[in-house]
Image (spheres, helix red, strand yellow):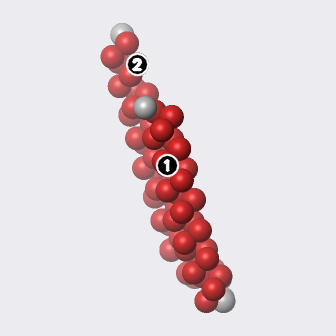
Amino acid sequence: MNSAKSFLVKLTSHVLEGTITFLSVLLAMGSLYWFENGWAKFAGTVGFLIAGYVITYWIAKMRD
């Protein structure tokens, strides 16, 4: 029973990490179209990628 629970926790964590990574990349690419200014495009792209990495890293640390 404990191994099944552990498996489900790890599976849920991986699915959540994958979803956050996908959304951060999608938002980063979208910021290239949403913003008019070049600096805003750069800041939006880098910001979304860093935010996605930090959130995913935090979830991975919680899993371990």
Quadrant in the picture for residue 50: bottom right
- Write the residue at 40% across / 19% down: 5
Please name the residue that numbered disc 2 is placed on: 5
Q: Quadrant of the N terminus?
A: top left
Where is residue 34 drawn, in percent x and y?
63, 80
Q: In the image, what residue type sits under mark 1? A: Thr
Please name the residue that numbered disc 1 is placed on: 56
Closest to the observer, 1 or 58: 58
Among all residues in the image, which is located at the extreme top?
Answer: 1
Q: Is residue 58 left or right of residue 38?
A: left
Q: Is 37 placed above or below 47 here?
A: below
- Write the residue at 46% across / 33% down: 63
Where is residue 56 drawn, in percent x and y?
49, 49
Q: From where the camera sits, is residue 40 visible?
A: yes
Q: In the image, what residue type sits under mark 2? A: Lys
Quadrant in the picture for residue 45: bottom right
Circles 2, 1 touching at the beta carbon (< 8 Å): no
